[in-house]
Amino acid sequence: MANISFYLFEQSPERQVESACRLCRKILRQPERIWLYASDTQLQQQLDERLWSFDDTSFIPHGIDQIDARICISAQLPEQSDWIVFNFNDQALEQFEKFSHIIEIIENNESAKQQGREKFKQYRRLGVEARTFKL
């Protein structure tokens, strides 16, 4: 069964890109690989730029469409199932069973929260019980 986690920012004004970088740094302490699934090329660029500069003491290795990197930013979903997928798109991932973990980051604004609620309902309709972490 796929592991799906929603990170819901209720208090913090932290942006989705910042949150993703913070989680990536934490996840990379384990031997995991991360796929940042974003079809918006502007968002891909923001993720790319922020991963370069996020941590003053260590570079977070990544690349756009570089499937050999520990973090891959792409508009496509990965072929292999050994990825943790951050979903930055508008819809829930219907092929959720294919991946070890799916992460949804919900910013602290009304449109993001509404979209998050819709994704949560989509996963529930697909028979998945997602976990929510309120931050």
Image: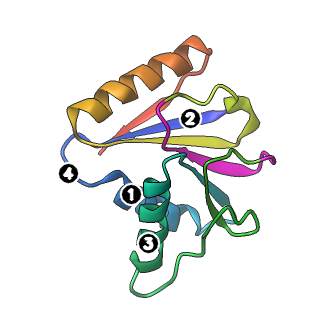
Residue at label 4?
Answer: 13
Question: In the image, residue 129 lies at what x, y percent?
Answer: 55, 22
Task: Give left or right: position of 36 versus 109.
Answer: right
Alpha carbon separation for disc pair 4 and 3: 20 Å
Task: Give left or right: position of 116 versus 33.
Answer: left
Query: Does the residue at mark 4 contact the one at mark 3 (Cβ under 8 Å)?
Result: no
Label 4's element?
loop
> Which of 92 and 11 lies nearest the eye of the viewer?
92
- Where does the magenta region start and end? 79-90
Query: Does the residue at mark 1 contact the one at mark 2 (Cβ under 8 Å)?
Result: no
Question: In the image, residue 9 lies at what x, y percent?
Answer: 28, 43
Q: Amino acid at mark 4?
A: Pro
Residue at label 3?
Answer: 49
Residue at label 2?
Answer: 4
On-image quarter of the N terminus: top right
Alpha carbon separation for disc pair 1 and 4: 12 Å
Mark closer to the chain start, 1 or 2: 2
Q: Nearer the viewer, mark 1 or mark 4?
A: 1
Alpha carbon separation for disc pair 2 and 3: 26 Å
Question: In the image, residue 124 lies at what x, y percent?
Answer: 53, 16
Task: Give left or right: position of 74 versus 38.
Answer: right
Q: Which mark is residue 17?
A: 1
